[in-house]
Amino acid sequence: MSSLLRHHGLPISEAMAFGLASALSFAYLPFVRINGLPLVSYRMPPRAVIKGLERSLDLDMRFETFGSPPAGMERLDALLDAGKLVGLQTSVFWLPYFPPDLRFHFNAHNLLVYGRERDEYLVSDPVGETPVRCARKDLEKARFAKGALAPRGLLYYLTTPPAAPDWARLGKRALARTARIMLAPLPFVGVRGMRMLATSSACRRRSGPAAAASGFSMRRSSRSWRPRPATRRSTGSRRAWSRSAIAGASSRSPRRA
């Protein structure tokens, strides 16, 4: 978003755009598992970041989704031919300029397209340091990937240049909104979510092999964690957790040193 706004004459850094959108947050969702591990998030979803910045800066933006890949690609071509800088939501897995060991099925990766030459698109990706090229077929796959957070060909662009904002007023408002998010009265969100994750981690460490060998597991009380004799049920829970942790670790691709 910062590159899109700078292109239209509003100087803003990526950190400032992130802050003004009140995108800083925290969530611990043990009932949602990815690769066998609970979901831990430290920011708002990407689309929420864009929408939050649009609301904060009172931007004139247009968002479009499509029912078919041909319609989405034709619309992208028309906007580029008209000189528009276009933002896209894509899937990392289908972008060929990503190294193979960094590709995974994440459908909320945003990038900018600023032109095209024959069957290649000129792409500015926030992950890379230089512009890249992407073949039409690959970009189409990335825009219309299936699964969670499916992009459905989402594209967005500014219809009019942004006006100069009152930075001090916007900063105070964004700080207040972020504080409300972090102090939300929900057990999985914000500061309470951090405490819940810390408590869960401590419980798992103490319920590991050493605790099993000593015949103790952990039980939560209102004041602290106290040991109690392990039962068949608690031992089975430890074994199930160990199997899921191993399965989750095995399913992740090894990273290069």
Image (spheres, rainbow, N blue to C red):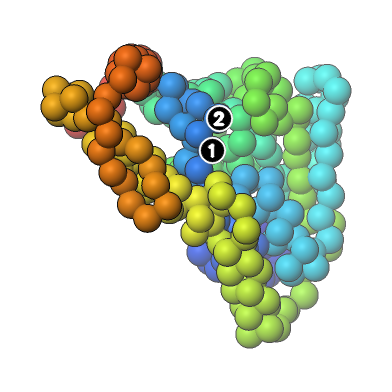
Q: Can you give x and y, in whole percent of width and height, for residue 37 in the image?
A: 43, 28
Rounded to the nearest whole Å, what is the CA distance between mark 2 and mark 1? 6 Å
Residue 42 at least partly seen: no
Query: Is 97 in front, or is 216?
Result: 216
Q: Can you give x and y, in whole percent of width and height, for residue 80 in the image?
A: 75, 41
Name which quarter of the figure residue 86 lies in.
top right
Q: Is residue 28 left or right of residue 5?
A: left
Query: Is 177 in front, or is 195?
Result: 195
**Marker count (numbered):** 2
Q: Residue at x 47, y 41 (%)?
A: 40
Type of the residue with mark 2: Val
Query: Is 24 in front, or is 68?
Result: 24
Quarter of the C terminus within the rendering: top left
Query: Is 129 in front, or is 185?
Result: 185
> Residues at badges 2 and 1 in contact (C-beta under 8 Å)?
yes
Classed neighbour count for the residue bearing mark 1: other residues with Cα under 10 Å, few (<14), some (14–19), many (≥20):
some
Q: Which residue is mark 1?
A: 29
Quarter of the N terminus within the rendering: bottom right
- Specify the farthest residue to the front: 229
- The answer to whether residue 200 is above or below residue 74 is below
Name which quarter of the figure residue 124 lies in.
top right
- The answer to whether residue 89 is above or below residue 136 is below
Residue 32, disc: 2
Residue 215 at least partly seen: yes
The secondary element bearing badge 1 is classed as: strand
